[in-house]
Image (spheres, helix red, strand yellow):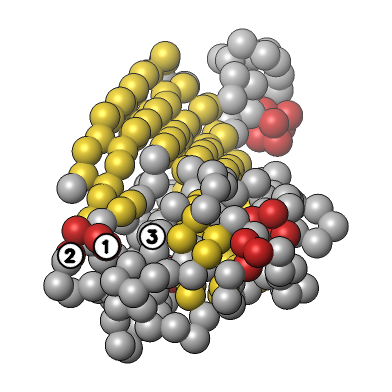
Amino acid sequence: DYHSAQLSVRKRFSKDLSFDFNYTFSHSLDIASANESSGSITGVSILNPLDLKTNRGNSGFDVRHLINANYIWTLPIGNGKKFFGGIGRVADLLIGGWDLTGIFRFNSGFPSPVPFDDGRWATNWNVQSNALLVRPLETSPTRTGDPNLFSDPTYAYQSYRNAYPGEVGDRNTLRYPGFIGLDAGLYKSFKLPGEGRRLTFRWEVFNVTNTQHFTGISTISIPQDPNLGLTPPATWGKFTGIQGSPRQQQFALRLEF
């Protein structure tokens, strides 16, 4: 089941500036799924094939909030423009006629794996059930020092219990951190002698702010009754990767003829 509200705004202020803005608020529910980038089939296992509704929960690809925007702006600099409109031909060749482009994206986090019942098969003989919460818990990622899905791993660890016979446990109740990114490009075209000849220079930057967003966590398993006071392993809940890539830049020249 997928439900959403979608908003799109497109505006062209002049021949020099235009932008698109899109927002989606959505919720997806199912009995089994995994996001395509996970590379895992764990999320598509049915833990109790005799009672499918017990597996119902947030889809593995559920994203509650999604924003993307893009713009194209011809900078108001150079001959005939608002700034330095009377400069000479050589100066205009250097500072006039530049275009700035950008793509912005934000999305709230995908569901993250929940702890599984270690070494037990409460319902499905081939797939272990998940653990069950005994008190409210939300992810509260720490991004400095020793980044972890939880600000207090011990509290989170002791918030679960083992699945009882017939129980499938919690599904997709935790969330990874969200993602935010900005890519930008600066380019200019130079006319060359001859019909239709042009040279275009481009400078493109991906992840302009060089922001790192964590994803992936060490295997989080639950032994017998951690809510009785057991402490978690040292790696429990630690992030293992990042979303996207560090800042990258590229330069290009294109000759059209």
Mark 1: amino acid = Asn
At label 1, counting other C-alpha atoms closer than 10 Å, the crowd grade (few under 14, some 14-19, many 20 or more) is many
Q: Is residue 228 left or right of residue 42?
A: right
Q: Is residue 98 above or below residue 37?
A: above
Kindly identify which numbered label has been placed on residue 55.
1
State if disc 1 and disc 2 touch (CB < 8 Å).
Answer: yes
Task: Please tell me whether mark 1 sits on a helix, a strand or a loop.
Answer: helix
Task: Please tell me whether mark 2 sits on a helix, a strand or a loop.
Answer: helix
Residue located at (30% from left, 26% from top): 7
- Residue 65: percent from the left, percent from the top? 42, 37
Kindly identify which numbered label has been placed on residue 52.
2
Question: How many numbered discs?
Answer: 3
State if disc 3 and disc 2 touch (CB < 8 Å).
Answer: no
Residue located at (21% from left, 45% from top): 2
Find residue 50 and report its image quarter.
Answer: bottom left
User: Residue at label 3?
Assistant: 171
Q: Tag 3 or tag 2, which sits nearer the N-term?
A: 2
Q: Is residue 180 above or below residue 240?
A: above
- Residue 67: percent from the left, percent from the top? 43, 36
At label 3, counting other C-alpha atoms closer than 10 Å, the crowd grade (few under 14, some 14-19, many 20 or more) is many
Task: Please tell me whether mark 3 sits on a helix, a strand or a loop.
Answer: loop
